[in-house]
Amino acid sequence: MKPVNRLVCLAVASVLSSTAYAQDLQLEEIVITATKREQTLQEAPISVAVTSAETIEQAQINDIADLQSIVPSLRVTTLQNSSQSNFIIRGFGNGGTNIGIEPSVGVFIDGVYRSRSVAAIGDLFDLERVEVLRGPQSTLFGLNASAGVISVVTAKPSYEWGGAVEATIGNYDYQGLRAKVTGPLSDTLAFSLAGNHFTRDGYFDLINLGTEINDRDRWDLRGQLLWEPSENLSFRLIADKGEIDELCCAVTNILAGPTAGLISLLGGQLDPNAPNSYNGYLDFAPRNQVDNSGVSLQVDWNLGNWSVTSITAQREVDSLFNTDIDFTSADLGTQVNDAKIDTFTQEFRLSYDAGGRFRGLVGAYFFEEDVDYDTSVSWGSDFRDYATLLVAASTGCFQGALTCNPNAFGGFEAALGLPAGTLLAGGQFNAQFTTQDASSSSFFGQLDFDVTDRLTATVGVSHTQTDKRVDMSDRGNELFGQLDLVQIGFGGAFFALTGLPATPANIGANLTAAGIADGVSVTACSPENPPPLCNSALGLYPFQFLAPVIPFENGKSDDSDTTYTVRLAFEATDNINVYAGVSTGFKASSWNLSRDSKPVLNPANPPLSPLGGYANPYYPRYGSRLAGPEEATVYEIGMKARWETVALNIAVFDQEIKGFQSNLFVGTAFSLANAGKQSTEGLEVELLWAPIPALDINIAGTFLDPIYDSFPGAQGPDGPADLSGSTPAGIHGTSLSVGFTLKWQAMGLDGFLRADYLYEDEVQVTENVPKSVATREVGTLNASLGATRNGWSVLFWGRNLTDDEYLQSSFPSVAQQGSLSGYPNQPRTFGLTIRKTF
């Protein structure tokens, strides 16, 4: 029996043997809108975790990344810059590092879809609750919810005057200010205005520059108007704006390969073999700038048995990042990314509920988005010398090969008739310009039918159509990466044997007579294959770090799919509800708008002789410019039980995604590829127990058994690999959060003490970095102590008090074969918050 199945049996047995608790207190009832209508958490027959505004405030949860400490099925990782975050639910999620990929976990704030993580990482302030919906949610949420949904619900304006001012200080010179005011402008019009500004010094020291990175400097502002001209009609207008201007993000050296010595010869430095170090070296501090803004209007019209909802939104995100691509103090290269995303969304819903046996809704959702993305890489002043040292150190060096020449690039330039110093010179760059226009429409409906007073059947269906158009062009003076070494080397071999240039006419007349066999064009020179019957230029192929950009216009992808939900919910007793069902999800094709990965020479499968044109001498790319759609299915049974002092939720599921869009950094670019099928069997348990009126105990666990059912053509530690049958990296089998909140009264103070501990078992961090080198195991403790009196409150808080160190992600170091790099987690933070409520 699998571990998950044993856990299921134990959990169910414990429920069946339990009895109701009768004490003079009751747990607070939680109302959610996960099914697009208000229900209590116990009534909603889906797996959903809810975090209240009170918990967010008491636990000092500032953003979605902090939320994962109390929602173990959620994982959030911050990567190359402040805005690149991956949201993962039940082990499924992607998209944070590639602007062309919408996440598989959809993020909605006040019903408005945020298409990229950069638009969803703002401060969690002035909230009502956060709902994390687990499993495919495409039937009701449509676009890009194949793995789940994070729904953030902010507080509405009030018709009573009120507000709060809050100031925070902490270690790393953390300083924060929050403020809110709300009140009536008339009997039918109310407003609210809330904002915050946070700054913090960095916790990662750049030793050679004498500065710190991974700092924080961001602000957010949100204004709302609520107009209710009648009790049946309301208009809610929300406008928000936020900015980030930070130095981020730190990268550590997990393994210093042979190239580390070459970097040292150039005077460069790195902190070798120190994955959890908070010290490093760069030749400049990377800067991240993000401007995120939007406006939305929600209209709700109650017509008695019928109700109409419309949500219209326009959003814009501008971001600019620069990165030292080698993450050392050697001046090897710089990357600059400049992106602009304009998004328009419109949702209409018509709901019916006459209090009878039928309830339902129908709706339509429309999405339009324009993406402009410019990315450039330029060589630094040390890159030519670094590449020359790499060539000289090549193990394939032998007499007669171009790569044996310590001035190989100079000799190559001379052979091509290029001026000395032309190739790989400092300041040379290659820029890629991409636009993507996407449009999507979804039409959906869901019906609830009360078969009996205790049994409800739910059927939902949605049809989604997504069209994308992509244009890509390039510009630059970086020549070496654009050279076709296969053709150049073949031409050299042909000339050495015949004394003739390799023109089609000369090749046709002399190829056989010269004794040139098939495969010469992709056979690198070696002692076993000496010149001239080999390609002497291929020794330089590994040093073409920048893959050629292949411009194209009007690239198209058109996808459509019909998803559904079928579910039965049964009220077994007044305290216990059970449900079972199947749901499907869909996410459209994604385009790789980052730099594509470099193809690999395939001498085991040589092309035909180049007579009449050259055949493709490469493996298929590690990824491609286009990954097909994702199709998700989950079979789930669950139970929700609630007594006066205990609430227990259990979900058992078998979830799969066909065509999972794997996005992996391979050292020079991102590899985008579809996994044939990824699946997981799992169990989720959430327990809330109030043994005495002053104490709440929370236990939440997620237990997963993931597998790549099929993933040929994947990327492993040693290059292309078939990962079918293996365990996906980065997915914890056990994630457990245990916490408590103790309320107290003393000296006229109302106070609380709370703590939560998150444990996640050891896993390989990423597929292309060996488990023997990079694993992650998490054990973090968060705690807070607060007291309130006469509208004043004081909060002492700490996060990661265990100062646990682990890697969020890992990757092959850029242009440093044999070296590996990673992103460290945030260290211990603590502080003091003072708040005045009026």
Image (cartoon, grey):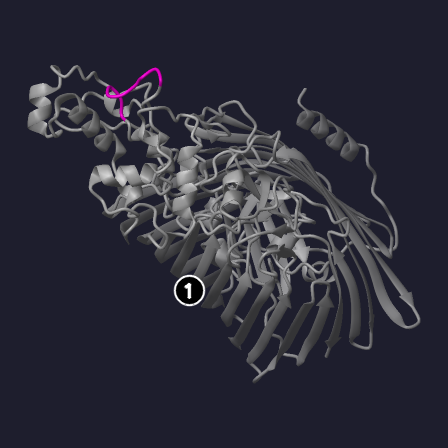
Q: Quadrant of the C terminus?
A: bottom right
- Measured as percent of width and height from the top left, residue 560 is found at 34, 42
Q: Which residue is rendered at x = 37% and y = 24% of the image?
A: 398
Residue bearing the label numbered 1: 316
Q: Is residue 245 left or right of residue 834?
A: left
Task: Tell me the crowding category of disc 1: few under 14, some 14 to 19, or many 20 or more residues within 10 angstroms, Cα based.
Answer: some
Between 424 and 295, the one lying in front of the other is 424
Where residue 751 sits, quadrant-wise, is bottom right
Q: Which quadrant of the structure image shows residue 810?
A: top right
Q: Residue furthest right?
A: 747
Residue 122 magenta-drawn? no
- Segment colored magenta: 527-535
Name the spot of residue 394 as percent of width and height, x first. Answer: 42, 30
Q: Main secondary structure of the magenta part?
A: loop
Amino acid at circle 1: Glu
Of all residues, the one furthest to the bottom in this rendering is: 186
Locate the N terminus and report the quarter of the image it occupies.
Answer: top right
Residue 504 percent location from the top left of the image = 9, 28
Q: Element type at marker 1?
A: strand
- Viewed as shown, does residue 617 lie left or right of 674? left
Q: Is residue 531 magenta?
A: yes
Q: Quadrant of residue 176?
A: bottom right
Most foreground residue, 758 or 657: 758
**Front one among 655 and 504:** 504
Residue 783 pos. (x, y %): 78, 55
Which residue is rendered at x = 60% and y = 74% of the image? 194
Q: Is residue 674 above or below residue 838?
A: above
